[in-house]
Image (tube, rainbow, N blue to C red):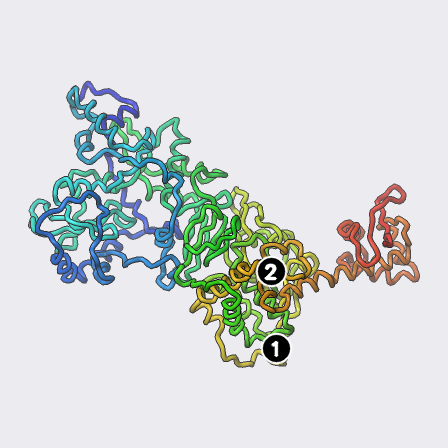
Amino acid sequence: MSIQQTKIVDSTELRELMGFASATENSASNTLSTNNFDNEPNKDIDSNQTASQTQQKIASDATELWGMIEQSPTDKPTVHSSSNSPSLDLTAEQTYALGLPPSPPLADSFSENISVEENLALTPTVDPNADEEKVESEISPIQDLQSRSVLAPVSETEPAQLASKKSNAVSEEADDVFTPKADENPVITKAKLTGIYLTPLGAGKHKLLNSLPGSDNNSLIIYSEPDENNPTGSAYCQHELTNKIKPLIEYLGIHKSEAKHKPVIRIVDGELHNVINAAEKELFKSGRFFQFSCLIVSVTTDPKTGDPSIVPTNIPSLTRILSHLVSWEKFNTRLREFVDCDPSARHISILYDSQSYAHLPNLKGIARQPYFRESDGKLIVEPGYDTDSQIFSVFDARKFEISEPSIEAATVALKLIKDLLFEFSFKASHDESAALAAIFTAVVRPSIAFAPGFHIKASTSGSGKSYLCDFISAFAKPGDTKKVSYPVTSEEATKAILSLLISSPAVIEFDDMTNDWIPHGIINRMFTSEFITDRILGVSKTATVSTRTLILGSGNNVGPTRDLLRRVLTINIDQRSSSPATRSYSGTPVEDIREDRGRYVAAVLTIILAWKAAGSPRADVENIVTYGGAWADFCRHPLIWLGLEDPATALLDQVKHDPDADALLALMTEWHRVFGSNPTTVRKAIASTQGFGNESLRDAICEFPVEERGSINASKFGWILKKNVNRIIGNFSFQQSTADGRVAWMVVKM
């Protein structure tokens, strides 16, 4: 068939005839830095500078590098059946000279500044398609050479032969839109076929014979598989600093798009759903992305503190990520073939705006140490994503050595923790128990749906309130805790709390509070609801965020009020000194915990496991609504079991001695004295306060925030009565009735 006889064919015929080679090359602008596209999506990457630094690393240890290579067998080229053959035993220094990363530590070795990609690579990722049969993917390099151009004349039998070969080489997952990447890097495959492949060196490095034209055939090439800095890979010859990847792939007959070793997504009209579905699948296969609160997110680790957090993507970063993970193509009508292109803005936008995702796993939160799975109570001691709990954990399991659970082990563990508290001056013994309960809450917060907050209260500055908060926080996470101001208005509270919780922090600390805890609606819900739903500021999405975060606060002579009295446990510190800020301390408990956090967290887990092993004995104490389940089992009963005073003592006192309840009882007493049990409207009650002898009724009403410019606001007073209808305090109860055709109120003596 001549060129003139060639006709435009549809996408199916194109796939049968031409394989996956593209006519144009991707721009170097697709080169990404792993850390940047996760954390700084809009920052430009200087790939030339990175390449220069790589060359300098190789050059600096060239003598040692090639000395090591020459010691390995190179007399005969060896063709291996797989590029996953055992790697050479290299020291950390030798791997650095090769440009290889040292053997990676486990996920919680935060002192080594591990990126989230390394953490994720070291932790198990569950693949829902793991049971599906694996087959070869993509056309082999030789087949691709045979079918390079649609316009090339072919014999009558060649298309049939090509189709026959392709049916054995392409994964069943391939279709008109998506082509998965080959199981093995095409460069490695072709190097084996041509006989120049020698041996793998580990971490994506391979040793090849140098058969490039004009080169010494006895010399070697170190080939590195594609990464963010070298999208087609790199190849360096002995004693040379020039990347030889281009002449290498030309020698092997491999197109640049193949050398990238990526899956291909083709933008085809009428296939919008399949294009978006394929892109989402590739995000899933990367093992780094989840769906969290209707958002596509990743888990990233702070390189300084080692603290993981959830980071939502945006459209620019999602575009860069998918351009890195996938080769994109569209049909060029002039060239009559598919050519490389950038990800489609339309498809990326639709994917980003989706409210749910079929392939991305759900993420409920993060754990920074071993945690108890809610469904079965099992202690999860391995890092990674757990499909049952939908929690992603980042920690080094080797650092959390948990003792065999027994009463003896629990006693030793409790002493280890209490020894750190010896310089804190608690007002009463139950305050120390409450501090221990806060520590236990810090450890198990990802495991329980509901937990109270904790407020550290003192009478003077310098009493150690903030330091005690830091001490408790150290059990919850590595690194420092971000301290925030308590919100003044409900609107401010909604914006602040939602933005804080969306990253799933281990701790939120309201530091140095100057006013009482105001019971804003979202803060009330934060303590009694497992999730909070609200609109994300600046984004046209409604977010549902988890509340599994430890909430701390501190302040002088301030504390929880009204609805928060049953949600926030107060811990009182009393230094018994007129100038506590000048006191000297001999210990450094916060620093001790941060230095060996695994040991102290394991002590808490040992106590809980020992209590469970003893049959979970529960003390005969008053129940606290909302916190009578998992929180009491993990943070209250084990401490009482070990002989400590009930840590919830202060919380029970707050509930029983509610100042609002005292004010309401005084109001009902005066109301009943003046009106008896007769129904009375709000306006009539307010008017009666102007009469002689009713000054005490006015004083009782004004105990509530109902005054405006010296007068009682009828609407505010009516709201107070409505909020407390049918509430029994003492022997009285406000009940709603009618009088003169209006809503009226009466106090009924029980």
For label 1, the crowd category at 10 Å Cα-Cα, with few meaning under 14, some 14 to 19 and many 20 or more, is many
Q: Nearer the viewer, residue 560 or 415?
A: 415
Residue ID at (15%, 44%): 79
The vertical placement of 582 against 702, above or below, is below
Q: Nearer the viewer, residue 19 or 193?
A: 193
**Quick one: quadrant of the C terminus?**
bottom right
Residue 244 is left or right of residue 491, and the answer is left
| Residue 569 locus on image (x, y percent) | 63, 63
Residue ID at (21%, 40%): 186
Residue ID at (39%, 50%): 38
Q: Amino acid at mark 1?
A: Gln
| Residue 647 locus on image (x, y percent) | 62, 65
Snapshot quadrant of residue 159: top left
Element under label 2?
Answer: loop
Snapshot quadrant of residue 511: bottom right
Marks 2 and 1, the one that precedes in the sequence:
1
Q: Amino acid at mark 2?
A: Pro
Determine which residue is flagged by label 2: 617
Residue 575 numbered tag: 1
| Residue 534 locus on image (x, y percent) | 58, 46
Q: Nearer the viewer, residue 6 or 334?
A: 6
Q: Is residue 43 visible in the rendered structure shown here?
A: no
Q: Are marks 2 and 1 in contact (CB under 8 Å)?
A: no
What is the distance, in whole Å, between disc 2 and disc 1 at their CAs? 35 Å
The vertical placement of 448 against 171, above or below, is below
